[in-house]
Amino acid sequence: MDYSQFLYMRPELSLMAVTVILFLYDLFAGEKGRTYFQPLTCILLLIHIAINLIPSEEPAVAFGGMYQYVPMMSIVKSILSVGTLLVIMQSDNWLSHEDAKHKRGEFYVLTLFTLLGMFFMISAGNFLLFVIGLEMASIPMACLVAFDKYRHHSAEAGAKYILNAMFSSGLMMFGLSFIYGTTGTLYFEDIPAGLTGTPLQIMALVLFFSGLAFKISLVPFHLWTADVYEGAPTNVTAYLSVISKSAAAFTLLIIFVKVFAPMIEIWQELLYIVIIVTITLANLFAIRQKNIKRFFAFSSISQAGYIMLGVIGGDAVGMTSLVFYILVYLVANLAIFGIISVIEQKTNGKVYIDDYNGLYQTNPKLALVMTLALFSLGGIPPFAGFFSKFFIFMAAFSAGFKVLVFIALINTVISLYYYLLIVKAMYINSNENPVAFFKSDVYTRTSLVICLLGILLIGLISGIYDGINLFGFGVNN
């Protein structure tokens, strides 16, 4: 066996090493040793990110085509790793509470195992490895959603998530059985030669898409999202809304381009309808929400529709735009959920939009960061979200979907309205008992500064988009 093939799995191996070290540390460290758990985790993740930050330039295939590598995959894995680090930094205050501090190690290990599963999803060259990665990401995620097991809403959210994940996985694997039955293979490189667009293969495409659309929260596979986002611990909600969604969206594009290329007209038509329904319904339902976590659940569903604009073209421009959108969405959404989490912890559970009335009076810095993140999500210039929407609209427009882009632009105006509702609450609405002034922990402050710098600078530094585009070669090979 050629063990040099393992060198292509550098992100997976380094992440596994971090996970094993943290598992052993949790097992053998005493009560005093656990006080260093947070800094140790952050340092190890930083080392993991540094090792994998610069991708190898040559595409490669390992283990007979089971595992594939192109530079763009390494870029996405690095972005997901940075997002995971930010989530862990924002979780320190929550994990320091009496009912959670003894479960800190479990949280870290489960989170990193879900990330490892996403890495396998992204680099899969065979549907068998893809399914293993999907389940490795989904099952620990259900544990994270139900992490506050003594809270009724958290346990309920965990049950809803795992049941929906089971049904979606069942649908997907049912579709994959059709693929294997009609083509005789599960290897991505070999399947296109056997695809002729028969009714059975169209059904396989629809079932496969249904399973992955659950992970991305696309309508009509979104019904779990609001309840799970509300019931899960807020930091887990942040992880779900960004990391899980981004990995699934990128994987969907890879598989559509590499596997279902002969059926491009069919899946483009399917995506066309799903994007319109997803963006429109999510925006309309977001306006009606009073709970801020449910509010951002529907915002997340809407953002998933925008992300799909980068998928529908099935070309290199769409892929670059999608990865850039994921990066911008990550810093904006994690800034928002970081603020929601710290306010929830400091106020013993205030999670309604009305609770944010007058936030600017007592916590002006948090209000400012929240406002800039909302402006970025809404696509207001000169923040990074404007550039990400511009590039992803441009990708869909250049692929010929002009009417779809016009509908998405109209929905962007609607989203601006409901994002400004929160800005109005923080700056204009009066509140006799606003959230009292508090000082957040150093990890949360650091993560918010990083997110803020991303919101302000990512769009203005043109080299970031150009750099992503530079490493995009090899995806369509």
Image (cartoon, grey):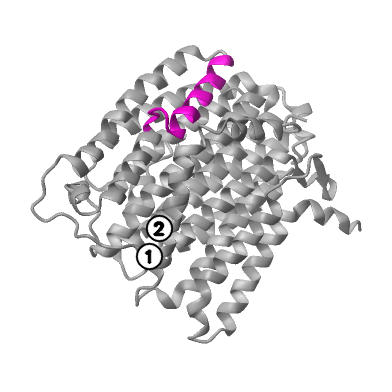
Using the image as rendered, state which of residue 194 and residue 366 is in the foreground: 366
Task: Tell me residue 90's x, y (percent).
Answer: 42, 59
Q: Is residue 164 visible?
A: no
**Residue at 65% from the left image edge and 53% from the top image edge:** 132
Q: Which image quadrant: the C terminus?
A: top right
Q: Amino acid at mark 1?
A: Asp
Secondary element at image label 1:
loop
Q: Please, which residue is most extreme toward the right here? A: 1
**Residue at 65% from the left image edge and 29% from the top image edge:** 201
Distance between mark 2 and mark 1 Cα atoms: 6 Å
The number of numbered discs placed on residues in the rendered structure image is 2
Q: Characterize the magenta stretch by its predominant secondary structure.
A: helix
Task: Tell me residue 420's x, y (percent).
Answer: 26, 34
**Residue at 56% from the left image edge and 24% from the top image edge:** 312
- Queried whether the magenta region covers residue 167, the answer comes back as no
Task: Using residue 307 as the reference point, say whether residue 413 is left or right of it.
Answer: left
Q: Are marks 2 and 1 in contact (CB under 8 Å)?
A: yes
Residue on which disc 2 sits: 445
Q: Amino acid at mark 2?
A: Arg
**Residue at 50% from the left image edge and 30% from the top image edge:** 388
Question: Magenta span covers which residues?
Answer: 378-398
User: Does 272 appear above or below 258?
Assistant: above
Task: Tell me residue 69's x, y (percent).
Answer: 75, 43
Task: Using residue 199 as the reference point, say whether residue 236 is left or right of it.
Answer: left
Residue on which disc 1 sits: 441
Secondary element at image label 2:
helix
Q: Residues within 10 Å of mark 2 (few under 14, many from 20)?
A: some
Q: Which mark is residue 424?
A: none
User: Does 475 appear above or below 43?
Assistant: above
The quadrant in which residue 455 appears is: top left
Q: Which image quadrant: the N terminus?
A: bottom right
